[in-house]
Image (cartoon, grey):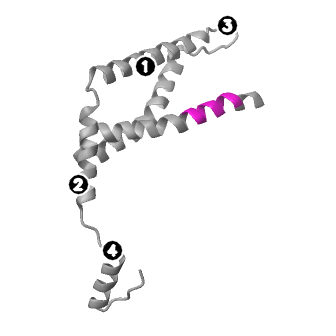
Amino acid sequence: AFWMFIPFSMIGAAEILVNPCLYYFAYTAAPPRVRSLVQAFNLLCLGCISNAFTAVATEATFPDDLDTGHLEHYYVLNVVCTLLGVLLYFWLTRCGSSGEDFKNDVEEELDVTERRPTATSAQLQEAASRTGECSAI
């Protein structure tokens, strides 16, 4: 079954390319106060929903006898659910905002972090020497 290497490699590459985009989208779409909660929910969904869907779809459409059963019903159900998910994604992202609010949030966040005063290493060494602590920075 070495030929299974090809589809599993494609799935692995797809997950490597898609998951960071999902993390970024979930992070930027969430208000700053609930970003950690949204990230936790995102990880929960990535880990649980596919397994739950597979369990239900297998139980509902997978035949007991592969010789006489209709295995194609299982694959048709997967294709239909995938197409519905893609259409739902495009509808939700296109019917929402134009992305300007995300851009404003990111710019505001960058402004806040750039204006925060930071100490230089010389200032840190000076402060450490005044307090009598070790100045190995």
- Are the residues flagged by discs 2 and 4 in contact, CB closer than 8 Å? no
Left/right of residue 99 with respect to residue 7 in the rendered view: left
- Which is closer to the viewer, label 2 or label 3? 2
Of callouts 2 and 4, the N-terminal one: 2
Of callouts 1 and 2, the N-terminal one: 1
Q: Residues within 10 Å of mark 4 (few under 14, many from 20)?
A: few
Left/right of residue 117 with respect to residue 25 in the rendered view: left
Q: Which residue is mark 2?
A: 112
Quarter-wise, where is residue 9 in the image? top right
Residue nearest the observer in this picture, 135 or 59 = 135
Q: CA distance from mark 2 to mark 3?
A: 65 Å
Q: Which residue is mark 1?
A: 86
Residue 21 pos. (x, y %): 44, 37
Residue type of the residue flagged with mark 1: Val
Residue type of the residue flagged with mark 3: Thr
Of callouts 2 and 3, the N-terminal one: 3
Residue 66 pos. (x, y %): 67, 13
Q: Residues within 10 Å of mark 1 (few under 14, many from 20)?
A: few
Of callouts 4 and 1, the N-terminal one: 1
Residue type of the residue flagged with mark 2: Val
- Which is closer to the viewer, label 1 or label 2? 2
Q: Residues within 10 Å of mark 2 (few under 14, many from 20)?
A: few
Residue 1 pos. (x, y %): 76, 29
Q: CA distance from mark 4 to mark 3?
A: 74 Å
Magenta span of residues: 6-14
- Are the residues flagged by discs 3 and 1 in contact, CB closer than 8 Å? no
Quarter-wise, where is residue 24 in the image? top left
- Residue at the location (26% across, 32% down)? 100
Q: Secondary structure at mark 2?
A: helix
- Residue at the location (50% across, 26% down)? 55
Q: Decide if residue 105 is in sight here.
A: yes
